[in-house]
Image (tube, rainbow, N blue to C red):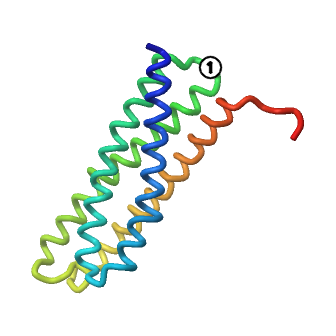
Amino acid sequence: MQKLISYLSAIALTLWVGGLWATGYLAVPVLFQTQPDRQLAGLLAGEIFHMMAYVGLVCGGILLLGERLYKQDSASKTRLYLIVAMLILGLVIQFGISPVMADLKVQAHPLDVMSSPFADHFKMLHGVSSILYLIESVLGMILVVKAYVLAVPAHSSV
C-alpha cells in the first residue's frame, strides 16, 4: 500500500504542478495571443483555471495523504507545509477571488467587464489572483525539486 501511495503521490505532484505551469504560463497566454475575441478568451481561460483548481484539490489531497500516512522524515514537515500552502492559495483563488470576478462580469453584462464601471475592481482582483497563482506555481516548483532531490541519490563526482 505504501508503494501505491508513493506512485500516486508522484503522479499527483506531476499533474498538479505541471498543470499549473502549463495552464498559467503556456495555454492561457497562447489563448489570449491567438483568440481575437478577448471576452471569449477570458471565458475559456476561466474554465481552464476552474478545472485545474479541482485537479489541484484532488492532487493536493493525495499528496497530503501520502505525507501523513507514510512520510515521517525530517523533510516531510517542509513538504507538508508547501502542500498546505499551495492548497490554501488554490482555495482562495477558486472560492474567494474567482466568484467575485465572475459576479463582476455578470453585473457588467451586456458590457465586457473591462468596458464597465467594474473594470478597476476586476483588474485589481485579477492582479491579486495572478500573484497568488505565481506564488502557488513557485511553491509547486520547490516541491518538485525537493521530491526529485530526495529521490535521486547524490553523486560525489560529475
Q: Residue 117's quadrant in the figure?
A: bottom left
Where residue 62 appears, x then y in whole percent?
A: 39, 30
The N terminus appears in which quarter of the rendering? top left
Q: What amino acid type should be assigned to the residue bearing mark 1?
A: Asp
Q: Is residue 110 above or below residue 56?
A: below
Where residue 100 sits: x, y (%)?
Answer: 23, 62
Q: Find disc 1 in the rendering and name its residue.
A: 73
Name the residue: 42% across, 64% down: 130
Query: What residue is drawn where x is 63% and y is 42%?
Result: 145
**Is 36 displayed left or right of 117 in the figure?**
right
Image location of residue 54, percent across then percent down: 30, 45
Q: Number of labelled discs?
A: 1
Q: Residue furthest top?
A: 1
Q: Quadrant of residue 77?
A: top right
State the image coordinates of residue 59 (x, y, percent, origin top left). 39, 37
Question: Mark 1: which secondary structure?
Answer: loop
Lateral position of residue 63 relative to residue 72, left or right: left
Q: Residues within 10 Å of mark 1 (few under 14, many from 20)?
A: few
